Every structure is written in structure tokens, then in C-alpha cells.
Image: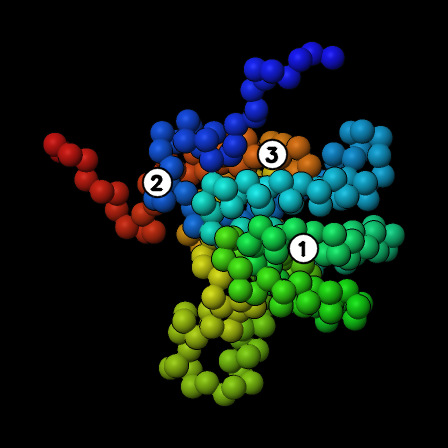
Amino acid sequence: MPDDEGAQTAPSPASAASRVLGSTESSDIPRHVAIIMDGNGRWAAQRGLDRIQGHEHGTDNIRIITHAAAELGVQYLTLWAFSTENWSRPAEEVQGILRILAQAIDSETEELHRRGARLRHIGELDALDPSLRQSVLDAIELTRDNNAITLTLAFNYGGRREIVHAVQSIVREGLNPDDITEDSIRDRLYSPDLPDADLIIRTSGEYRMSNFLLWQGAYSEFFFSPKLWPDFGADDLVEAIADYSRRERRFGALAAPTSGR
């Protein structure tokens, strides 16, 4: 066995970002990163594994990316774990995903709490088993005062369904049409205090939004990674943020004039 003396430790995400970005100023780091975690099934198929084993490895990766994002200075991380359309998958796979969620809540909440992460949820919990729904609510309550990073799990979530939910709330409350504004709709989204996503990452080489954060992603920058989600690591997150830092965000306005022109 080789001697460990003089061995170098792997660089942290923050130090890797410093090399890639040239600085770690807050303006270089997106405040809110959202990730479409795609490719678990294909990752498993490539290895001759059951699809559910791919979901298990994908869930393990959540811990790695959450810790890396917090170290990089990301304030909000939103991960899409299960869409409203995923209920149409084979019942065995759906039940397996729900089981994995329950296990992850039990095994990861204390560590997230210890590291100062605040856990949130967007979507609809009513379809979940009562015990699982309560576990999610308990984890949210336990971590509610933490401020190192806000980790939002989009589970049983769909962007169109979220907007329908907001409109239904407006109708129930009897708002006058003239009083319906962008703010009044935002106030009735699943999590109205969740800021718009600065950067949306999709793994697995697909180039679609797939009904994710349709309202909050109106002016998001996108980064598409060819890697399947279980293989997407801290270095890949650094690469996405470095790419984001080189873009000029105009929000519909003209680009700033170049000096000397």
C-alpha cells in the first residue's frame, strides 16, 4: 500500500471554482440553481441494472451536489425529483421511487440539518402516503430556520399545474380582473418566496424544459450536460457555473454598449 505522506487531497468545489472563474465574487455565482435530474434509468441500463437502482444512485448524488452548491455560495438549489407525469410510469417503478424518497428523508435530514440546509418542497403532497407526507413536513419543520442553503425538492410537481393552482386560488378569492398582476400570481405559487431560477441545468443530454419552473424560469440561463445524473459531480456543477458567469444577462434589454464604440 503506498504511503499517504505527501498525498494531495482533492480540491474543494470552491477552490475549483476559483481556478475556473478567476474569482469567487458573489456576482459570479447564481443565487438560485435548479436542476432537472435526468438519466437515472439510462445510467442503470448501461450497467445492466434495474431502473430503480439508477434512482437509488441518483438519490445518493443529491447529497454530493447539495454540499458542493452550498460550498460554492449558491443560496437556493431546486432539484426536480418527480413530476406529475411520472405517475404514468410502471407501478413498480413509482413505488420504488416513493420508497427511495422515504429512505432519503429518514437518512439524510439530520445531516442536512447539521450542515445548515433548509429543506423545502414544491408540488402537491396529497397524493403521497400519509406517513411519507408527514415525514416530509417534519423535515421541513426541523430545518426551517437554517440558512446555509435552501434545498427545494420538486416532487409531484409540474410547472403548468403550479400556474393552474395559482389561478384557481385567484378565482376562489374573487380577485377583480384589474387586480390580477404578475405579483398576484407569484404570491399564489407553491413557494412564493422562492426566487426566480438564475441557472437551470439539465443532465443526460436532453434539451427540454419538460414543464419545469415555467414561471420562475422565464429568464433563466440554461446549461445542458451530456452526463447522466448519477455521474454529474461537483466538477460538473463548477463547469456549469463557470459557463453561467461568462454570459451577459439582459432580461429583454439591449446589451450594454462596448467601451470605445
Q: State the SS at label 1.
A: helix
Assign a secondary structure to mark 2: loop
Mark 1 or 3: in front is 1
Left or right for 188, reference 36: left
Q: Position of residue 108 (x, y in %)?
A: 70, 51
Query: Where is mark 2, residue-wise?
Result: 25
Residue lying at 53% horizontally and 36% vertically, measured from the top left? 237
Contact? badges 2 and 1 (CB < 8 Å): no
Q: Label 2: few (<14), some or many (≥20) within 10 Å?
A: few
Colour logic: rainbow
- The quarter of the picture where residue 205 lies is top right
Q: Find disc 3 in the rendering and name its residue.
A: 233
Label 1: which residue? Answer: 110
For mark 3, does the 10 Å Cα neighbourhood hold few (<14), some (14 to 19), or many (20 or more) residues?
some
- What numbered label is drawn on residue 244? none
Separation of marks 1 and 3 at Cα, in angstroms: 22 Å
Residue drawn at (68%, 67%), measured in percent from left and top? 138
Q: Are marks 3 and 2 in contact (CB under 8 Å)?
A: no
For badge 1, the amino acid type reads Glu
Q: Nearer the viewer, mark 2 or mark 1?
A: 1
Would residue 204 be visible to someone looking at this image? no
